[in-house]
Amino acid sequence: MTESRVAVLKTDSGNILRDYRRLLELIQYKSIIDINQDTIIKLNLSWTKYFPACSSQPWQVEGVVKTMVEDGYRPDRLLPLENKTVVTHPWKGAKNNLWLPVLDKYGLKFTALPEVEWIVYNFKSELLKLNEIFPDGIEIPQMYVGKQIIHLPTVKTHGHSITTGAIKNSFGGLLKEVRHYAHKYMHEVLVDLMLMQKELHPNILAVMDGTVCGDGAGPRTMTPHSKNLLLASADSVAIDAVAAKLMGFDPLSIPYLRMCQERGLGTADIAKIEILGDDITEINFGFKTKKSFVIWGDQMLRKGPLKFLEKIALHSPLVVWAPMASNIYHDWFWYPVVGKSIIRKYSRSEWGRLFDLYKKGRNPS
């Protein structure tokens, strides 16, 4: 099986777990993920709070975990995890996004990466920017070395990288809390992360949820749209390219995707990707990337007219103002003023009703 295949299926809330099984079987996941090896399941937490399309959905987690456990993968060798950022908390996020009851149901234990050992790892690849950003060495979780990995991103836009998906999901696992220093060179850093993963992981699979997709000022302050799609691939570049195409972008116009293809790290040219499953030829969500107030301010300091203040504002003890400002804007202003009204509308959709079922402990299995 070639790596540049992407499975895409249409789904609905009544068949979501069965369709995740169909998706994994369509991509022949058992030929990608070795049943006899430990498997990291890298969840995606973009906000400690729950917001549609923002983070891995509970049915996404269950669809993958349920299929694997039923197929004989040992629960103690499946390692779901997520990291901390300056604005997210892994345990609170796992609770608010309803991952914990799903994992407990199948006998899996959640790992918060700040609680594990981190080591300086000397990568052999010629990295574009990360060695410059972290001159004292790149620290990664020791448990990542030599383990295969499954990424669980969602389909959404991102103010720093235009789109975000499987490749960007590694950003939250392979870099420590200070990874916000990489925002200035986001596209080059995403290429570096692909190079790093090729060294670390013998096998990589991405399983992307597009049941609800995020448009606009991602990865948090977005407009969610029900799109009822699921994607999977062993090629992180290809799945991100297909997701970008679905959202209405030309994948080769997105720098990190184009640079990854140029370096042989995957396929971003849609014409060279084999699409398995449902026909997506005519699908175009018409999404547009926007910048939230926080991302706009960050880019003004790092690359815009205020860059003369970058060092004192973002690389000194005064940097504590940045996460504080982000939390005040997102959690105290945007979420209660704008986000809750969006969630109320979303709660009436089929996916909002399904989330409510999970919240009540009545998941669809």
Image (cartoon, rainbow, N blue to C red):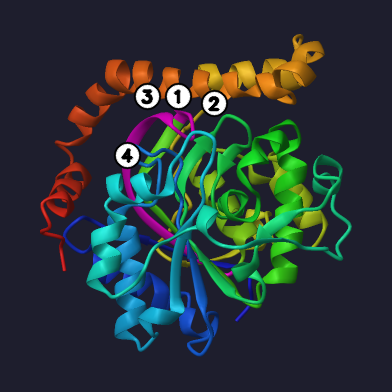
Q: Are marks 1 and 3 in contact (CB under 8 Å)?
A: yes
Horizontal side, residue 338 vs residue 298: left or right: left
Q: Gap between marks 4 and 1, in whole Å?
A: 18 Å
Which mark is first along the chain, 3 or 2?
A: 2
Question: Is disc 2 surrounded by few (<14), some (14 to 19) or many (20+) residues within 10 Å?
Answer: some
Q: Name the residue under label 4.
A: 52
Range of magenta residues: 216-234
Q: Name the residue under label 1.
A: 327
Q: Gap between marks 2 and 3, in whole Å?
A: 11 Å
Horizontal side, residue 59 vs residue 274: left or right: left
Which mark is first along the chain, 4 or 2?
A: 4
> What amino acid is at disc 2?
Pro
Whether residue 326 is visible here, answered yes or no, is: yes
Q: Gap between marks 2 and 4, in whole Å?
A: 22 Å
* Quadrant position of the C terminus in the picture: bottom left
Q: What residue is rendered at 60% in x and 81% in y?
A: 1
Q: Name the residue under label 2.
A: 323
Horizontal side, residue 93 vs residue 275: left or right: left
Q: Gap between marks 1 and 2, in whole Å?
A: 6 Å
Front in this rendered view, residue 325 or 244: 325
Taking the magenta stretch, the answer to whether it contains residue 115 is no
Question: Is disc 1 surrounded by few (<14), some (14 to 19) or many (20+) residues within 10 Å?
Answer: some
SS at circle 4 = loop
Disc number lying in front (4 or 1): 1
Which mark is first along the chain, 1 or 4?
A: 4
Front in this rendered view, residue 244 or 34: 34
Q: Name the residue under label 3.
A: 331
SS at circle 1 = helix
